[in-house]
Image (tube, rainbow, N blue to C red):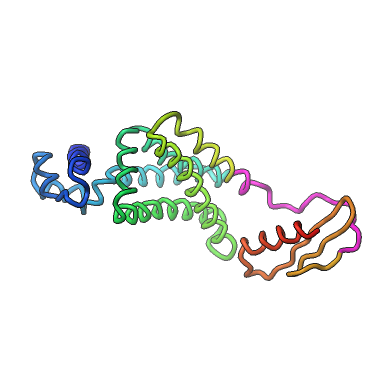
Amino acid sequence: MREVLAQAAFQLFLERGFERTTVDDIVARAGVGRRSFFRYFPSKEDVVFPDHERCLAEMTEFLAAVDDSDPVGAVCDAARIVLRMYAADPEFSVQRYRLTREVPGLRTYELSVVRRYEQTLAGHLRGRFGADGDGELRAEVIAASVVAAHNNGLRLWLRSGGAGDPEAAVDHALDLVRGVWERPAGPSPALEKPAPPAVGPSGITTGSGDSEVIVMVASRGTPMWRVVQQIEAAVGES
């Protein structure tokens, strides 16, 4: 019945537009009553995303069953569950993508759906990294990175009209995330002792010669983007 209602709704959205289609129109096209519609969908917006509740439940179940050896890999694999949902019905997925681009209210709704996925991934990572201090921050940042990478690859495929293999772009994007966050957190390899440093702006010191070393000193609360910005400025000056 969910599929019947979703199919009827999208036929009407394509014919009349989202705003001019009512719930009464949808149930009339599907041949059911209003009570049947609201048994499956709380609102007209929900019928645009009929499969996300099932997908979210599948993601939650998957994460509950994985081991603790590779938490970043686990959340990347969990994100691929969403990709497979879209890839299972390319025509519907492309139609939905185009519809959400046209209707501001649907874009807002879609953001709330994406946020639920992100919170699910972050919750899993907090269980591995801890919920205090940098553990919670690390969980939130990695989850946001995974969602952003997944969505970047997915939207490339959707914008193409569903042509080609959607997994290629998503895998490439997620590999970038893993390359950053799966690096070991141990000390850096020993380096030759550099020449006495010259103190630069913003607490940055720079060495000299062929083996130049840049050391960034910042307070604990400094945003990462500011740290990167200051390092890039120092590299440009040196």
Q: Is residue 218 visible?
A: yes
Pick the front one: 66 or 170: 170
In this rendering, would 80 be left or right of 13? right
State the image quarter where residue 1 is shown. top left
Residue 216 x, y percent position in the rendering: 74, 63
**Relative height, residue 50 to residue 140 (above, below):** above
Query: On the image, which quarter does residue 200 sit in?
Result: bottom right
User: What predominant SS class does the magenta segment belong to?
Assistant: loop
Q: Nearer the viewer, residue 18 or 2?
A: 18
On screen, residue 200 versus residue 113, left or right, reads: right
**Nearer-the-camera pick, 62 or 110:** 110
Give the quadrant of the C terminus. bottom right
Name the side, left or right, on which 4 lies relative to 59.
left
Q: Is residue 228 above or below residue 121?
A: below
As for residue 164 lying within the magenta part, the answer is no
Q: Find residue 191 and report its horizontal and vertical position in percent.
A: 85, 51
At 46% across and 42% down in the image, what residue appears?
78
Determine whether 28 is above or below 193 in the image: above
- Image location (x, y in percent) of residue 66: 49, 42
Q: Residue at x 18, y 40 (%)?
A: 15
User: Residue 190 lies in magenta, yes or no?
Assistant: yes
Segment tinted magenta in the rendering:
178-197
